[in-house]
Amino acid sequence: MHIPDGYLSPATCAALYAASAPFWYVALRRLKRLLATKLIPLLSVFAAFSFVVMMFNLPLPGGTTGHAVGVSIASIVLGPWASILAISIALFIQAVFFGDGGITSFGANCFNMAIAGSLVAWLTYRAISGKCAIVSRRRVFAAGIAGYLSINVAALLTGIELGIQPMLFRDASGAPLYAPYPLKIAVPAMMAGHLTIAGLAELILSAGLVAWLQRSHPSLLRATAPGAASTEAEAGGFGWLAIRPLLAGLAVLMLITPLGILAVGSAWGEWSPHDFADAAARRQIAAVSANQALPAGVPQGIERLSSVWTAPVPSYAPPFLRSSSFGYLLSAAFGSGLILLAALVADWVFTARRRSG
Amino acid sequence: MRPNRVIAGSIHGFLRVLEHTLESEELARRAGLLQSLDPRVKLLGFLGLIVAAAASRRLEIIGAVFALAFVLAVCSRVPLRTLVIRIWAAAFAFTGLIALPALFLTPGRPIGRLPALGWAVTAQGLRGAVYLISRVETTATLSMLLVLCTPWTHVLKALRVLRVPVVLVVILGMTYRYILLMIGTAEEMFESRRSRMVGRLEAKEARRLAIATAGVLLSKTMQLSGDVYMAMQARGFRGEAYVLDEFEMRPRDWSWLALFLALGAAAIWVGH
């Protein structure tokens, strides 16, 4: 994740320094105003904590170990602006004194991890936790998801930055001057490790630390949770009211699902056996696949496996409905309802287990 | 008893940082070429050379900057072992592994085939891999030489020449100190747990231990922040940060700065 010097062109590095500068400026101004004289000790000590926690070997399910960045816990405890500065400072010390990450690519590393990571972590944590109680399980869940998403967004940005290098910078012979892999290799290569090991490490650290703080130092979770009740009882059970904005957003998304009908053809890679048999569909597939030659017939694997499972509502259109738009809406409501039901059941099971334990 | 990977791995990481820090401080005190130069000259000069190595489109220019870095290291009495193990091997192990598939995946003119597997190595892939590795080795050598031959407090103060705000220089200085303090604290926590352990921790238990240690460290962090703030106030701190500027440029420093910048500019110009 820490991009060393030499992987990005100076132009990319300059652009990412320029992109990071306004965030650093705003963060420093906001914190100076809010913290005044407390700014220096708080940021120094928390940056040191972030640095040290990045060195922890976290055991992951499956027998492997991973390192977390700690960006999510910094956002949860300090808020996004202080987190941006604290993580940037930790990254600077890593780059300059310990050679972990480059000096020219410092702006890029800060943009990916400190800035995008902090903002994604904070927004995710606030959106999911809402105003639920400080000791609520939902905060642990929110922290875990915030950690997982923040590290994966940072990895995605890193993959994109590395992946655009061979598109933009080659020598006269066509050899890539910097990171050599195009987007189609760089992005999956970055994401593979982060969707699994690194994402899991961040999820475990964030969720674990929030659970630990709930038991030992709940006051540390208060700074970014204004108005949150101290106990579950004060917050009033599951707290549907607290996630009202999320539910409203979900309803809007459901209402606009018929927009999907506007897209023509099949999504790339989601072809059915019929598409391979249809001449027009074959032309479309070839056109969006860099004109690669298609197999003459339907690939045997697709033909065999496509009949293993038949969806009850194929193509989001129940057969008994005439309107495909209404079919989309109904499918969205049914799918979201199932997910919410699963969340309710999981919450009920966890709460019952906690009460009995 | 088999040492647990969580505890042993973390302790190993902490000790390695402390070892590198002590080695850097020892090297920075030695009498050598780079050690004798003004930190601002090294910061600006090396920044220029790093940008030149990153911007160059010609391998021979990157090679020349690398050779210059090597000569500077030898003149500054940096042991070859430190260069090889701490910088070159570490950079090669990471970047070499990343660059290796580029030999086969980069489209271009085939220049050979891998025995047994038959994969074609392309000229463009080979050149791209050499670009990446040579650039990484050169820039890593330069950036590590800067910290190996300059006390860290001087590196931080030299940042003022780049117009870094005083408050950030002070924060960076304090962060560095507290990193060493917290590494010591974390190492002691893991060590005390290891000394009380018989057998091997289950993965779940090891996870719980790592989280609890991080949690305690976080609590100590917040407490320390309050204590440091009180101590700063007790000493009269009112929010204004100052950095003593004891550096003085001598004619020799100006000459070296001019040389570094001229070489960097020449490398960028010829390299394009």
Image: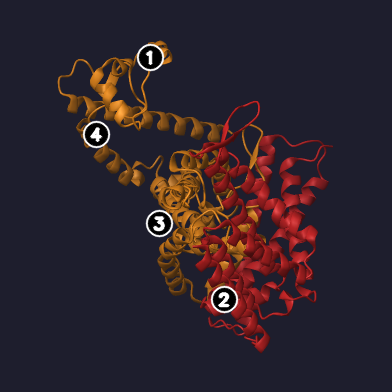
Chain colours: A orange, B red
Going 23% across and 28% down the picture, which residue do you hit?
A: A328
| Residue at mark 2 | B262
User: What element does badge 4 sit on?
Assistant: helix
Residue B221 visible to an observer of this rendering:
no
Whichever of callouts 4 and 1 sits on the residue coming sooner in the sequence is: 4
Whether the residues at callouts 4 and 2 have beta carbons within 8 Å, the answer is no
Residue B61 drawn at (x, y percent): 59, 62
Q: Is disc 2 in the same subunit as disc 1? A: no
The CA span between labels 4 and 2 is 61 Å
Q: Is disc 3 in the same subunit as disc 1? A: yes
Of residue A193 and residue A294, the one placed in the foreground of this image is A294
User: What element does badge 1 sit on?
Assistant: loop
The CA span between labels 3 and 1 is 52 Å
Q: Nearer the viewer, mark 2 or mark 3?
A: 2
Residue type pointed to by label 1: Ser
| Residue at mark 3 | A227
| Residue at mark 1 | A306
Q: Chain of mark 4?
A: A
Whether the residues at callouts 2 and 3 have beta carbons within 8 Å, the answer is no
Residue B127 drawn at (x, y percent): 56, 47
The CA span between labels 4 and 3 is 34 Å
Q: Chain of mark 3?
A: A
| Residue at mark 4 | A257
